[in-house]
Image: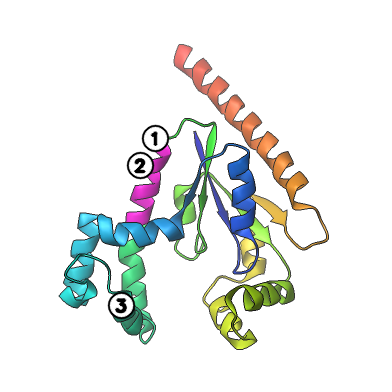
Amino acid sequence: MQIIGITGGIGSGKTTVAKIFSLLGIPVYSADDAAKEIMVNDPLLVSQIRDHFGDAAYFEDGTLNRKYISNIVFADKEQLAVLNSLVHPATIRDSEAWARRQSSPYVLKEAALMYETESFHHVDKVIVVSAPQAMRIQRVMKRDSVDRNAVLARMHKQLDEAIKLKLADYIIYNDEQQMVIPQVLSLHRKLLEDARQAGKNFSSDGQA
């Protein structure tokens, strides 16, 4: 089974595209959603966060004190880097265990920071969902009710779009000029065929 990463800059619509794959029966792992869960449920990660940020990182009932953590990491880039260095490996472990439980020809791992955290090394191929910056800004301003500067600040924390496109194995354009669903269907057929060929080659190797 292949693990296909799917990423894109904020406002690109990667989650929407991932949902279309999901409607086609492809399991989708959301790294961002999973990270929130494992920061509470993964004993090793919880221990590491407590060791570095102190017991105040968690409430007495075991839930994460998000305000406390946010106040620390958003005021200090080094602390944010430490938090990411703890959370991202745990998310990779969790996603790989999740993938082993699936039975489809391929699965998707959706992550906003796939290249930034080098988690692309742990997937077989990467889809980048692309849209013009001006369009992405407008989408996020409307979606999150924030101003332009707030969106730009978030964009600056992500890898430049042009670099992502150069690194991508596949690109889906969500620019309101090209229809998204036909692009997804075409790529879905290709990934199914690739999985079929990989299975055939594995079977041949096994018999040899």
Q: Residue at x 56, y 79 (%)?
A: 156
Quadrant assignment, res 40: bottom left
Give the mark, 1 or 3, whose residue is nearer the N terminus. 3
List x then y, in percent, for residue 183: 74, 47
Q: Are marks 3 and 2 in contact (CB under 8 Å)?
A: no
User: What crowding class fits label 2: few (fewer than 14 Cα within 10 Å), some (14-19), or many (20 or more)?
Assistant: few
Q: Main structural element of the magenta stretch: helix, strand or loop? A: helix
Q: Is residue 88 left or right of residue 5?
A: left
Q: Which mark is residue 97?
A: 2
Q: Are marks 1 and 2 in contact (CB under 8 Å)?
A: yes
Is 164 covered by the magenta stretch?
no
Q: Is residue 136 above or below residue 76?
A: above
User: What crowding class fits label 3: few (fewer than 14 Cα within 10 Å), some (14-19), or many (20 or more)?
Assistant: some
Q: Which mark is residue 69?
A: 3
Q: Amino acid at mark 2?
A: Ala
List x then y, in percent, for residue 71: 34, 84
Distance (Cα) linking label 1 and label 3: 32 Å
Q: Amino acid at mark 1?
A: Arg
Give the mark, 3 or 2, whose residue is nearer the N terminus. 3
Q: Which mark is residue 101?
A: 1
Q: Is residue 8 left or right of residue 57?
A: right
Q: Residue at x 43, y 58 (%)?
A: 33
List x then y, in percent, for residue 85: 33, 66
